[in-house]
Amino acid sequence: MTLAGEKRAVRRKREIPSPDPALLLAWYDRERRDLPWRVAPGGVADPYEVWLSEIMLQQTRVETVTRYYRRFLSSFPDLEALAAAKLDDVLKLWAGLGYYSRARNLHACAREVVRRHGGRLPDDEAALRALPGIGAYTAAAIAAIAFGRKAAPVDGNIERVVARLFAVTTPMPAAKSELRRLAASLVPEERAGDFAQAMMDLGATICTPKRPSCLFCPWREVCAAFNHGKPEQFPRRAAKANGRLRRGAAFVVLRADGAVLVRRRPSNGLLGGMTEVPTSEWRADDPDETLADAPLAAEWRRVPGRVRHVFTHFPLELTVYRATVPAGTRPPKRMRFVPLARLGEEALPTLMRKVIAHAISEGIEGEGRKIA
């Protein structure tokens, strides 16, 4: 059946009442998740804490964010403290959370708010969106939750809820504008912040991608997808192409005094500003001679196996080479040696933690290859 035919078939079925926000709010008052950045229903949230949590929650699970959020807030308890901090210190606390452009934008945004807004986040979506790292969803979430504005934040969870409520047959991502319009139509005049969080909770705990718990949903009776017996078929998805596998080499230089060679990645781009061991270029074709990119002359040994990591747009495989050099070895230009015992203080992304762990924990096999 064509999409147009499906829409006609949906219209021929019995009329389904519109979702009542009061039903969802009553459910939220009973079942809401207890999260460290939330206040009791009807309470006034701290805009800084709302903003910080929303940035951290982008593409990251709540369980992971909770740990990082508490630690981050203890170091930077308010926006002014974050603005006054060094970027390196912010990145160190962010290390392991991923999507590091969020941390750089968070820091830049804090400084911009101090400079342009007297240290207070603006309370409307347009002004929020003008700040670094704040897009449409985050601006709406802050406006609704922190300031009570009638705004509709729409993330992946909320897209799924709305697509099922109205049985939207347009495939993603083309359906996004329609879903935003429908979500905005649901926001009540009062308790907009609680309603936004209720939608988030509904998508995260009840209206899940697979095997949704429809029997516990406060909107079950008015959900078009449930009434048609097809909740898991929504939202519809267009075919998605996977990114091509990229490969490269990572070079772990261990100095005899217990230090490892590292460098800082460029500020812009993937893992920008983070600490890494030297690597070759990551390419979609197999490098002919990865040792050509080694940072210094040494007897290199290839560590058995490879380190695999998946970024948003592509998977990566790194061959790891290890070399041991004398205690007096000086680092190449724009690199430095860091004691292994102090690596925890560095802004190491998860990928580099994997590489170093692989190099120092796996047995070294094979012939050494010396380069001059």
Image: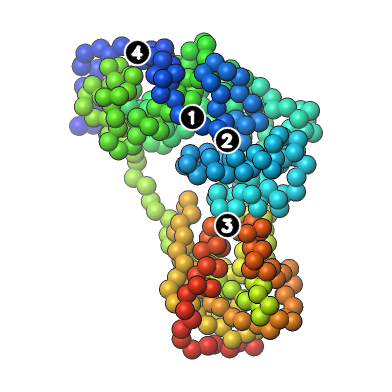
- Depth check, mark 3 against mark 1: the one in front is 1
Q: CA distance from mark 3 to mark 2?
A: 20 Å
Q: Secondary structure at mark 1?
A: loop
Mark number, residue 147: none
Mark number, residue 18: 4
Q: Which amino acid type is shown beneath numbered disc 1?
A: Asp
Image point 53% across, 21% down: which residue?
40
Q: Which amino acid type is shown beneath numbered disc 4?
A: Ser
Q: Which residue is mark 2?
A: 53
Q: Is residue 328 in view from this perspective?
A: yes
Q: Which amino acid type is shown beneath numbered disc 3?
A: Pro
Q: Secondary structure at mark 3?
A: loop
Q: CA distance from mark 2 to mark 4?
A: 31 Å
Residue 84 picture quarter: top right
Q: Which residue is mark 1?
A: 34
Mark number, residue 349: 3
Image point 52% across, 73% down: which residue?
359
Disc 3 to disc 1: CB gap under 8 Å: no
Q: Earlier in the sequence, mark 3 or mark 4?
A: 4
Q: Earlier in the sequence, mark 2 or mark 4?
A: 4
Q: Is residue 295 in view from this perspective?
A: no
> How many other residues sit within 10 Å of disc 3, few (<14), some (14-19) or many (≥20)?
many
Q: Earlier in the sequence, mark 3 or mark 1?
A: 1
